[in-house]
Image (spheres, helix red, strand yellow):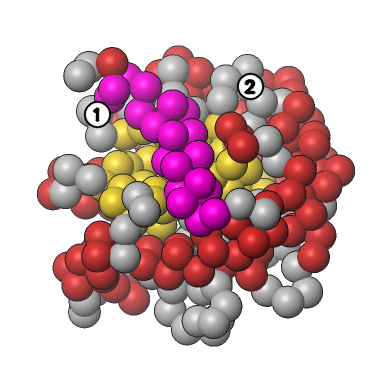
Amino acid sequence: MKLVDSHCHLDDEQFDADREETIARARAAGVDTMMAIGTGDGPPDLEVAVRLAERYPFIHATIGVHPHYSAKAAEETFVRLHELANHPKVQAIGEIGLDYHYDFSPRDVQRAVFERQLALAAEAGKPVVIHTREAWEDTLATLRSHWQGGGIMHCFTGDERQAREALDLGFHLAFGGVLTFPKAEEVRQAARITPADRLLVETDCPYLAPVPRRGKRNEPAFLVETVRRLAEVRGVAPEQIAEQTTGNFERLCLRAWASNG
Ligand SMILES: [Zn+2]
Ligand SMILES: [Zn+2]
């Protein structure tokens, strides 16, 4: 079984002591490919994922300013993001979006930085990775008016109605550890109705470890637990989930990569 973890924070300090081993365990578990998310602790360092992707052929990178850190974005941030968008290992812009749960940055600043990064992604011709929390309506409204490309609703934890709204916009839905939580029946229903060609899996490690690792530090190797549960929910074999989600990731994020041979 070959899997892609479409969203992991391998730069996180929780991996400082055993990053090499964590990556080796992922590969041993069948997690062949990882997309390292480049938001880190926010500007000015925009290259936390690029540095990893430069060291490992099977790690890809995103760049972007997380909504939490929108207030740290300065003019030179966007200049640097423009330059980095052309890096050969940068496959997507993200995670970007709106987070009204924590409100670490003022909402008008979050919206402005989100819109600017959507414009940047459109210019670069790259998909976007969307983070949205307690901001569903505003996120969708922004995407409807400012985005026409592909993308990923990362850590999708919405219900069936929200899933359909995102799917109608052309988005892929990435399911993570929450899918395995006992109370997450609505999320499982959303996973049931997602077309096979729009399905992705992720860990969002070090956060949100799936059952039976819930509450512990998450890591890409644990993706296997989410894939097992997703297979049960959809009534197919885990190998089929692996094949579908890997193919979807390659088509969405590695198009240029693939066509370059
Ligand atoms: Zn997120
Ligand atoms: Zn994340």
Mark found first going from the N terminus, 2 or 1: 1
**Above/below status of 186 relative to 239:** below
Residue at 38% x, 64% y: name it. Answer: 220
Q: Nearer the viewer, residue 202 or 124?
A: 202
Please identify the quadrant where the C terminus is shown: top left
Q: Secondary structure at mark 2?
A: loop
**Residue 195 or 219: which is nearer the viewer?**
195
Where residue 107 sits: x, y (%)? Answer: 71, 47
Disc number placed over residue 147 in the picture, else none: 2
- Which quarter of the figure has residue 171? top right
State which quadrant residue 101 falls in: bottom right
Q: Which of the pair 93/219 is nearer the observer?
A: 219
Please check the rendered image and state whether residue 139 is part of the magenta-colored stretch, yes or no.
no
Task: Say whether residue 148 is left or right of residue 164.
Answer: left
Q: Circle 1 is placed at which residue position?
A: 87
Magenta-drawn segment? 237-258
Give above or below for 60 relative to 34: above
